[in-house]
Image (spheres, grey):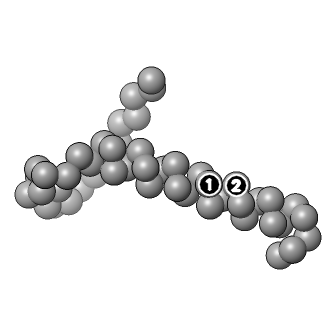
Amino acid sequence: MVTFTISIPEELKKKIDGHPEINWAEYLKKRFELRVKELSKFEELKNSGKI
């Protein structure tokens, strides 16, 4: 597995830290997967001439 590092504003980090019940790495991984699927579907529709 690859490691992905991002920088976020300090204020956002404080808010994230206020929710330790959330596995943020897992949440972001799922959001990335969903977005990639959405983009793939969009490209599929665009290439087929449906949009």
Amino acid marked by disc 2: Ser
Picture residue at 37% right of the left edge, 49% below the top: 28
Looking at the image, do the residues carrying marks 1 and 2 touch, with CB atoms under 8 Å apart? Answer: yes
Secondary element at tag 1 = helix
Picture residue at 72% right of the left edge, 64% below the top: 42
Q: Residue furthest left?
A: 18
Q: Tell me the number on the disc at residue 37.
A: 1
Q: Is residue 15 left or right of residue 28?
A: left
Q: For residue 13, say whether it is visible.
A: no
Front-most of 11 and 22?
Answer: 22
Picture residue at 59% right of the left edge, 52% below the top: 36
Secondary element at tag 2 = helix
Q: For residue 45, say whether it is visible.
A: yes
- In the picture, the quarter occupied by the C terminus is bottom right
Q: Residue furthest bottom?
A: 51
Amino acid marked by disc 1: Lys
Q: Is residue 5 left or right of residue 33?
A: left
Q: Residues within 10 Å of mark 2 (few under 14, many from 20)?
A: few
Residue indicated by mark 2? 40
Front-most of 7 and 4?
Answer: 4
Q: Residues within 10 Å of mark 1 (few under 14, many from 20)?
A: few
Q: Residue furthest right?
A: 49
